[in-house]
């Protein structure tokens, strides 16, 4: 056999293996323990979810699409030359969560059944937010249903079901249940009310995201804010859904640290020009926490500021402004294995405040004692507090550009800044609103920020019938294809 055909055969075999792993390899692996107490799976399900979400936020495509990060080496991610994107890691997490639920049901542990459903909703929401239509009701069924070619559900169907699930989980946690083991609940230490707040806040995030095309979104949001006892939210730092990094090894360390990935990986990811320029424009104190000063301002060739971000998709970005000493790095704290300001954030109180600010500002809901303005200021204050900005937030909000003016543009600028290092949220909110306005650089493969991930190559090869149906149903499989959320 000639070399090229051999390579193609080996690649096909590898891809086939990856496709199976994407949904059900764990479910058929003979080494997997078939009977284990659910509590032992809980911490794994939480850490895999939170740390992977954070890794994407800082390290991978959402960081580029959200225009927080510019790569000065290996720049294809910034040029949006993405091609098909693998979803195996997310479905693998979902398989662990399914095992958690199965074992909890088997051992009559209803408290862990509910927690598994919340984690399941979070991960499936992430999949459909990034890809659109996706295997959902027929996913993860290879073992019990012998279904290794799952059909794709419409995004609208997935969203509506997940919204129901999160509502049902809040209601289930209101009932008397056995205690959650605080040792294995690494997110909330067994605090049921915090799990309720988490579920409700995720639901609020999803309702805003689908409000354009889901007729009941605003009414459901109104019902939630009408009864804070029934629907408590993440509205204070004490309730943030945040998992700290331990920093003892690569798996439990901040993804930008040299423990996790080596300094060379940290060094090739620079703060974007969009991020640095906006922080400078607003005289934002968080710049000192997030961004490092330029080493050699005098040698700068374009920008003489002490903080300089790198534009997207330009020729030789590593040489921008005179080279590495003339552009900013992220702050040294982001190269540490663990720092109390940099954690795996699933949702924070500032995001909830900005969600409510937008809903109130638009006139779609009312809320006792709150206005779009008050929640806007609260969101800024909470973000400043979380990162320890060290200045009275009122001096920041008194500035003409920050002082509340009721515009969506202003609100989204502040929300975008606050969502640095929170999953794909900055990208997805830009996609939803168009703010901040981003212009891809001259070498970008397309003239707009991508709208979605393309389906995995393994689906094209190994699930072609369902892939073709999904592609037709979605209206295409391109980075520019509009999913239900934004049609």
Image: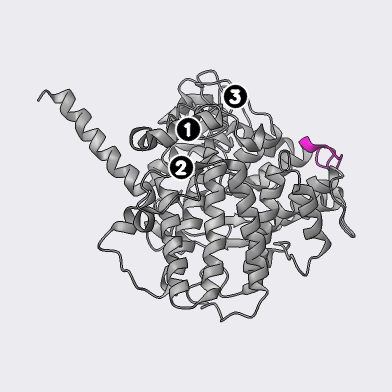
Residue at the spot of label 3: 448
Could you tell me residue 106's position as x and y percent?
43, 74
Query: Which of the numbered marks, if any, corresponds to residue 469?
Result: 1
Q: Is residue 404 part of the magenta span, yes or no?
A: yes
Q: Which secondary structure, mark 3?
A: loop
- Classify the position of the C terminus by image quarter: top right
Dominant secondary-structure state across the stretch colored magenta = loop
Examine the rendering and report whether any part of residue 306 can be seen.
no
Q: In this rendering, is residue 168 above or below 332? A: below
Which image quadrant is residue 143 in?
A: bottom left
> Which is nearer the eye, 223 or 306?
223
| Mark 1 → mark 2, Cα distance in angstroms | 8 Å
Mark before the other along the chain sequence, 1 or 3: 3
Spatial distance from mark 1 to mark 3, Cα to Cα?
26 Å
At mark 2, the secondary structure is loop
Magenta-tinted stretch: 398-409
Q: Is residue 88 visible?
A: yes
Q: Which residue has dot 2 on it?
A: 151
């Amino acid at each position: 056999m000639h070399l090229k055909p051999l390579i193609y055969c080996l690649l096909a075999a590898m891809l086939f293996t990856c496709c199976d792993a994407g949904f059900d390899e764990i479910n058929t692996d003979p080494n997997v323990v078939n009977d284990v107490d659910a509590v032992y799976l809980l911490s794994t399900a939480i850490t895999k979810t939170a740390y992977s979400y954070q890794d994407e936020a800082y390290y991978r495509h959402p960081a580029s699409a959200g225009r927080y990060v510019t790569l000065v080496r290996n720049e294809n991610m910034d040029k949006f030359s993405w091609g098909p994107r693998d979803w195996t890691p997310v479905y693998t997490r979902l398989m662990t969560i399914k095992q958690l639920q199965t074992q909890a049901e088997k051992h009559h542990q209803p408290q862990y059944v509910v927690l598994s459903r919340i984690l399941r909703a979070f991960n499936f929401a992430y999949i459909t937010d990034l890809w659109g239509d996706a295997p959902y009701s027929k996913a993860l069924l290879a073992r019990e249903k012998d279904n290794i070619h799952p059909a794709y559900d419409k995004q609208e169907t997935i969203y509506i079901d997940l919204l129901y699930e999160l509502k049902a989980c809040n209601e289930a946690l209101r009932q008397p249940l056995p205690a959650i083991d605080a040792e294995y609940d690494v997110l909330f230490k067994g605090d049921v009310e915090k799990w309720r707040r988490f579920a409700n806040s995720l639901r609020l995030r999803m309702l805003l995201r689908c409000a354009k095309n889901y007729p009941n979104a605003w009414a459901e949001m109104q019902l939630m804010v009408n009864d804070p006892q029934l629907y408590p939210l993440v509205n204070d730092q004490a309730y943030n859904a945040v998992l700290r990094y331990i920093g003892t090894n690569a798996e439990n360390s901040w993804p930008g640290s040299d423990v996790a990935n080596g300094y060379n990986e940290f060094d090739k990811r620079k703060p974007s020009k969009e991020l640095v320029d906006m922080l400078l424009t607003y005289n934002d104190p968080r710049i000192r926490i997030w961004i490092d000063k330029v080493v050699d301002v005098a040698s700068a060739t374009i920008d003489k500021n002490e903080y300089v971000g790198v534009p997207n998709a330009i020729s030789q970005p590593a040489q921008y402004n005179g080279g590495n000493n003339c552009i900013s790095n992220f702050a040294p704290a982001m190269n540490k294995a663990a720092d109390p300001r940099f954690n795996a954030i699933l949702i924070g109180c500032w995001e909830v405040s900005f969600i409510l600010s937008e809903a109130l500002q638009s006139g779609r809901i009312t809320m006792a004692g709150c206005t779009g303005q008050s929640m806007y200021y609260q969101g800024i204050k909470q973000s400043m507090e979380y990162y320890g900005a060290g200045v009275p937030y009122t001096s920041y909000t008194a500035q003409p550009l920050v002082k509340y003016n009721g515009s969506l543009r202003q609100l989204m600028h502040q929300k975008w800044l606050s969502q640095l290092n929170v999953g794909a949220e900055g990208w997805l909110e830009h996609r939803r609103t168009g703010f901040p306005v981003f212009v891809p650089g001259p070498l970008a493969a397309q003239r707009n920020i991508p709208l979605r991930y393309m389906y995995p190559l393994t689906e094209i090869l190994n699930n072609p019938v369902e892939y073709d149906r999904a592609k037709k149903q979605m209206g295409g499989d391109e980075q520019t294809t509009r999913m239900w959320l934004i049609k």
